[in-house]
Image: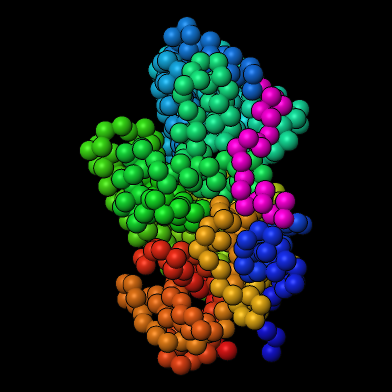
Amino acid sequence: MSDPVRLRPVDPARAAALGRELGLGATIAQVLLHRGAADAASASAFLAPKLRDLSDPQSMCGLEAAVERIASAIERRERIVVFGDYDVDGTTSAAILALAIEAFGGEVRALVANRFEGGYGLSELALDRCLSLSPALLVTCDCGSSDHERVERARARGVDVIVIDHHLVPEEPLPAFAFLNPHKPSCGFPYKGLASAGLAFVVAARLRHRFAPSFDVKDLLDLVALGTIADVAPLDGDNRRLVRAGLEQLDKTARPGLKALMKLAGVRPGRGLGGRDVAFRLAPRLNAAGRLGDPSVTLALLLERDELRARARAEDIEAKNKKRREIEAEVTKEAIEAVRRIYGERPTHGVVVDGKGWHPGVLGITAARLVERFGVPAVVLGHEGDEATGSGRTLDGFDLHAAFVRSAVELLRFGGHASAAGLTLRVDRIEAFRALFADATRELPRTGARPIDVDVEIGGAFDLPRVDELRALEPVGEGNPAPRFSLPSVVEEAKPVGEGGAHLKLRLRVGRRFLSAFVPNHEGPAPTPGARVRAVGELGPDAYRGGDAIELSVQRLFAD
């Protein structure tokens, strides 16, 4: 039987030498070698990203025109409406620009899209809401690149439109006053990975030079970190510089709404926040209101200055997130049962499942759960009447959007990216689409038997890393995944925890040291004390013990 763990190549001597130069242990030095650090200088640049090394914004096509028009509106006291999409990136982008424009003396109103009233982006209903405020200038955030008709309609009403977006750019020219998108063919800005929150920050920083040098735009970086991580933007280059500084700002944020939400989420400031604190604790809560109803609740939380109102808004969002988890669990359970019923326990190609009344706000999350569970691309559809709407998620290396293109004959509309996309089709065409999607994904390799890739196995030349070394790798996430470790261990204690004992808490002996480990959604009997296991997962600070204690989040647990 093949080894279930596949170790990346290691070079103990080279890792030890790099570690000595950097004052780090060989384990983290080996991780840096895996991250492409060729020497101590490049490793140091990775470990200590600086805002001063951000790409020159002057090469951003459309930036100067956008800044000049916003500045003119501020000086003339023209009304500005900032409109963001309903996700965290769109909401934080709108908040960033609204806060900056207000600080510079502008008259500004911020709005966000609603998935249940107009849907994604600058829909007709959304534009009606914006125009009802009689603006002279409309700035869209995280949407607008494909909204030619709505932009033209606003322009015909005498409203200038500035589009700030990072989604794919159609060939047809956009009739906007200014259009900021690094993916425009004419844009010479070298870094293409900015989320809309990062782009909004670039605009705010340029406005600061025009208006108020005393206003510290670094205070907006907590919002940049939230939007960038939540949008699963790559955490390299400029994003790494912005998000590292943003996490430090979030750790000491003065925003009453974020402080209240962090407390409810169990995120303890002052200890050094990481990418996973945002991705798994804060972002789902900030998204919850938009998934179930009105995302303006989240925008109001970010902008709220009153402590009591902020606490009430945070409690409202926490309640919505609890409801979202309940709905998600039920839909996921039904979706898993549907996969088993239609495809069996081990599908060999992509799966499509549908359910009447499945909540549209959790379909994307459910699709991601199916990908994790079955190892194939997944599409989850919900329907009430004649049309079904849903979301798809996929595996690394498989282009979901391309699969939708191949199946377009059965779809009313679709859009998105290679890794995540949405679609709408008639209910009576689901079976035909299911067959086309199966054909498009049939050549996928079966993933059930694939070994899990590991950066370093603890033992011999590689000891457990320190907390400060792990924090130096932050932010971890897309483009900079948390290192994965393999730990040959002896079980000292094992006990079920959580509702119904769904999870497992372990105390492991690793060499001469003891380590806490957490196994989420553990299936099967718990290992007995004295059992030899190989625990594979991510190491991080122990949130409960604090200090220098570390904990292993177990992704796979094998008998050794």
- Please give left or right for residue 163 compared with residue 96 in the image: right
Q: Nearer the viewer, residue 497 or 416?
A: 497
Quadrant containing the C terminus in the rendered view:
bottom right
Direction from residue 182 to residue 362 in the image, left or right: left
Residue at the (42%, 80%) spot, across then down: 506
558 relative to 433, above or below = below
Give the farthest residue toward the left.
308
Residue located at (62% from left, 61% from top): 23
Q: Toward the viewer: 386 or 178? A: 178
Provide residue 342's location: percent of width, then percent of height. Answer: 55, 71
Point 47% across, 34% down: residue: 220
Tell me the quadrant of the picture where the N terminus can be found.
Answer: bottom right
| Residue 181 higher or lower than 115, as above or below | above
Q: Is residue 51 magenta?
A: yes
Front one among 265 and 509: 509
Residue range corresponding to the magenta coloring: 40-62
**Is residue 58 shown in magenta?**
yes
Q: Residue 38: image x %, image y %? A: 77, 57
What type of secondary structure mainly makes up the magenta span? helix
Relative placement, left or right, of 384 versus 205 is: left
Q: Is residue 546 visible?
A: yes
- Number of marks drawn: 0
Classify residue 320 as left or right of residue 47: left
Which one is nearer the viewer's eye here, 91 or 359?
A: 91
- Colour scheme: rainbow
| Residue 459, percent from left and from top | 61, 80
The picture places residue 42, in percent across and down from the top left corner, at 72, 51
Q: Please name the residue shown 41% across and 63% down the image.
A: 547
Q: Is residue 335 visible?
A: no
